[in-house]
Amino acid sequence: IGELIDEGLLVRVHGRGTFVARPKLEQALADNLITFSEDLITQGIPFETTVLERTVASPNEQVSSPLNIAPGDKVFVLKRLRSVGGVPVILLHNYVVYARCPQIEAIDFKKHRLFVVLEQLYGLHLAWGRRTFEARAGSTSIRAHLELEKSDPLMYIQQLVHLDDGSPIEM
């Protein structure tokens, strides 16, 4: 059992027992800007996307400030759940500067990936991004979407993507 735990096939939870570990997915964190879906495609891992929300809204300060837009300006809000083998693995909340991509809310993001749409349909060049990682306790809603228990670990990633002119486009 110890060897299986060392190999990552089993996980031991103090006071609860030993369980079969879920398969691990790793995302490349190289110098290039690669999305989670691109990484899955590169690895040949099929995934499903469920679109939870796609709306145009006025952002709060936590969204408008990093995107460098005025509080009255609009953002496209896209919330999706990605699953592998029927198991939810990532909950995405994207905020995109709406003035740079009008009518984006009409696109079916179950079939189309956000960054591909921004680059190919709107002609935007996504030049660079910054990601921050933080371990957090998930809210009740997040845990429900990801089918997590209250004690399950959760990695929160915040990303801010810039165009080649330096202006932020997506968070």
Image (spheres, rainbow, N blue to C red):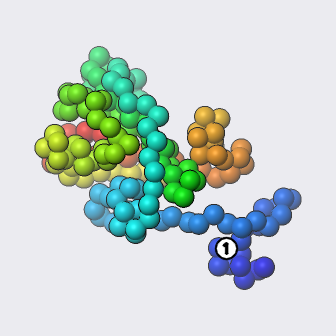
Q: Which of the pair 137/144 is nearer the observer?
A: 144
- Asked which quadrant contains residue 9, the reply is bottom right
Mark 1 residue type: Leu
Given residues 20 and 35, the one toward you in this image is 20
48 vs 151, nearest the viewer? 48
Image coordinates of residue 97 in percent, x first then y, are 26, 32
Label 1: few (<14), some or many (≥20) within 10 Å? some
The residue sitting at 22% across, 43% down in the picture is 118
x, y percent for residue 111: 34, 45
Residue beneath label 1, please? 9
Q: Is residue 12 left or right of residue 80?
A: right
Find the residue positioned furthest to the top.
72
Residue 37 position, x and y percent, is 38, 55
| Above or below for 2 versus 145 | below
What secondary structure is marked by label 1? loop
- Which quadrant holds residue 109? top left
Can you name the residue that lies furthest to the right here?
15
Q: Is residue 52 above or below residue 131?
A: above
- Along the viewing direction, whichever of 171 and 56 lies nearer the viewer: 56
Residue under the point 28% across and 30% down: 106
Image quarter where the N terminus lies is bottom right
Question: Can residue 135 be seen at all in this image of the molecule?
Answer: no
- Which image quarter is the C terminus in? top left
- Which residue: 72% across, 83% down? 3
Residue lying at the far bottom of the rendered structure: 3
Task: Name the residue at 84% across, 59% down.
Answer: 16
Instruction: Give the tally of numbered discs.
Output: 1
Q: Is residue 158 visible?
A: yes
